[in-house]
Each structure stands twice: as structure tokens, then as C-alpha cells.
Image (cartoon, rainbow, N blue to C red):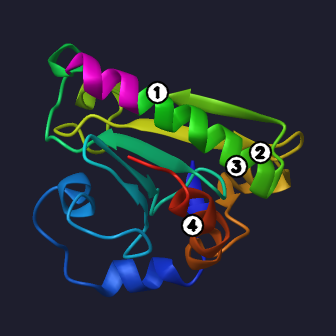
Amino acid sequence: MRQMWAPWRSEYIHAEKEAGCVFCKATAARPGEGLVLFNGSVSVVVLNKFPYNSGHLMVAPSRHVAKVEELTPEESIDMFRLIRHCTSVLTKAMNPGGFNIGMNVGKAAGAGIDDHLHMHVVPRWNGDINFMPVLSDVKVIPEHLQKTLSLLLPFFERLSD
């Protein structure tokens, strides 16, 4: 399925591609920088730069790790703590009717970034599949990423590590 992008898409297309891991870079940023919502000692929460829906978040361990079995118990617990927080925040801020939560582990499973494990938290609304995907195989993302960042960031500022 193709996606119809808002203004940040053309910025991405024309920008020089950065080397390195986006999640490792996020662990070096403060909340509000880039698309980082929370940066703890064990895990990080970022907005997906190429969202399936508005509010699409990703939770990743701070440590560069590619396999589920390589996670420490502390990393596993912290990631699920943050997933719980993400669903609570998204419910308060955006009122979705449900969520898709999951991960793609490895290229064969569809991971776009396969060398740093991460979980997707995608808010869903009844009827969020409109005529665009059905008629033209295009997905419309209705909200600019910076607006979503501004909406969600205050909920993460109160979150302790």
C-alpha cells in the first residue's frame, strides 16, 4: 500500500540520509528533540517518522539489540511498562477505539529496522480505513508529526525513569 504524505515527506525525500541507528540516536536526544517523547535509562519512546496512523509510537530498548531473546529482564519489563503508558496517553490525548501493538523481528518478518528491536503502538479508530486505501491504495495521515509530538510530549514529561 502506498501512503500519501504531509509536508515532512518531501523534506525526507530530499534530505541526505543519515547513517547509523535511529533508535540509538534517539537515546542521545532529549524529549522533544527530533521525534523523541521519552528517553529513559533502559528504554526510549519515539514517534514513527512514517506512521501507519496519527500517534504511531515505537518503544525500543536503549541498548542496541536485535533479538527478543537478547533482551534483559529489566529491558523487557521496562518496554511493557512504556507500552502501557503509551496506550494510556494515546487514549487520553487522541481517544482511539483500539490499538495494534507488536513487533516485526528480522527482515523476513517485515522489520524496516531489523538491527534494533522495537515495538509498535498504533492507535486505531473505527472507520480509520477510508476510501483512499480501497480505491487508490493510498493511506492518508491526517496530522503533522510535530503537532502529534506537541500533543503527546506533556504526558511523557511526567513519566519517571
Q: Which residue is mark 3?
A: 90
Instruction: Find out whether the residues at labels 2 and 1 contact each other: C-beta distance under 8 Å.
Output: no
Q: Earlier in the sequence, mark 1 or mark 4?
A: 1
Q: Residue at x 40, y 85 (%)?
A: 11
Question: Residue 126's x, y, as percent?
Answer: 88, 39
For the residue labelled by badge 3, is the local secondary structure a helix, a strand or a loop? helix
For the residue labelled by badge 2, is the local secondary structure a helix, a strand or a loop? helix
**Residue 4 visible to the viewer:** no
What is the crowding at mark 4: few (fewer than 14 residues within 10 Å), some, or many (at least 20)? some
Q: Earlier in the sequence, mark 2 or mark 1?
A: 1
In the image, the segment drawn in magenta is 72-78
Q: Residue at x 56, y 39 (%)?
A: 121
Q: Is residue 69 left or right of residue 123?
A: left
Q: Is residue 6 above or below residue 54?
A: below
Amino acid at the residue labelled 4: Leu
**Residue at the right extreme, as displayed:** 127
Q: Is residue 61 above or below residue 95?
A: above
State the CA–CA distance, disc 4 to disc 2.
Answer: 14 Å
State the CA–CA distance, disc 3 to disc 2.
Answer: 4 Å
The majority secondary structure of the magenta stretch comes to: helix
Q: Is residue 77 covered in magenta?
A: yes
Amino acid at the residue labelled 3: Leu
The circle drawn on residue 80 is: 1
State the CA–CA distance, disc 2 to disc 1.
Answer: 16 Å
What is the crowding at mark 1: few (fewer than 14 residues within 10 Å), some, or many (at least 20)? some
Question: Residue 85's x, y, as percent?
Answer: 58, 40
Q: Residue at x 38, y 22 (%)?
A: 77
Q: Which residue is mark 4?
A: 153
